[in-house]
Amino acid sequence: MIRTVSAFLIGLVFGAGLLLSGMADPSKVLNFFDFAGSWDPSLAFVMGGALLVAAIGYRLVLARPAPVLASSFSLPALTTLDARLLAGAALFGIGWGIAGFCPGGVVPALGLGRIEPFVFAAALVAAIGAVRLFEARRIRRLQPA
């Protein structure tokens, strides 16, 4: 129960930060990519601040022997760049540049009463389902008969 409440509160702080910084507004994000028009550098400052907080946070948290609410840290096993990671990053960037939403930013935007976040969220869920289906079929093909 405490892990669920903790995750909820962390998500609430994250969403509030995105709303306060304007990053739940796709036009603000898209203006960051519009170098020839109405360029808005505020996204770079938000990302820079997030990078600084994350770098300090990771150093402090990973210095501990274990997390507070779990028995061990859950860190990625793969540490190399592969085609799946690069393809996923490219799709993320393309989708973000077209829609102005990222998965984290669309969640608080759902509460703004606009249809675009719902369309994006539905497309995101469909894409996740398609990738899982594709991966399950790929794994079945690789297994010996």
Image (cartoon, grey):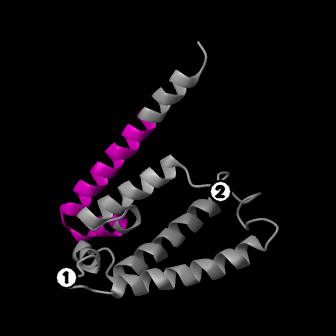
Q: CA distance from mark 1 to mark 2?
A: 37 Å
Which numbered disc, 1 or 2, marks the residue closer to the eye? 1
Is 48 drawn above or below residue 116 in the view shown?
below
Q: Residue at x 26, y 75 (%)?
A: 25
Residue under pointer 2: 79
How would you rate the neighbour count of disc 1 (Cα within 10 Å): few for under 14, some for 14-19, many for 20 or more?
Answer: few
Q: Earlier in the sequence, mark 1 or mark 2?
A: 1
Identify the residue shown where x is 17% and y is 83%.
37
Q: The residue under label 1 is which amino acid type?
A: Ala
Image quarter (top left, top right, bottom left or bottom right) of the N terminus: bottom right
23 within the magenta span:
no
Q: Position of residue 114 (x, y in %)?
A: 19, 66
Who's the residue at 50% across and 52% down the image? 85
Crowd band around label 2 with a 10 angstrom C-alpha radius: few (<14), some (14–19), many (20+): few
Residue at x-position 31% and y-position 81%: 22
Q: Nearer the viewer, residue 50 or 32?
A: 32
Instruction: Name the main secondary structure of what is drawn in magenta.
Output: helix
Q: Position of residue 12 (x, y in %)?
A: 46, 72
Residue assigned mark 1: 36
116 vs 52, nearest the viewer: 52
Amino acid of disc 2: Thr
Q: Which residues are magenta?
A: 106-133
Task: Give the vertical position of 76 relative to 53 (above or below).
Answer: above
Whole-percent x and y of residue 28? Answer: 26, 79
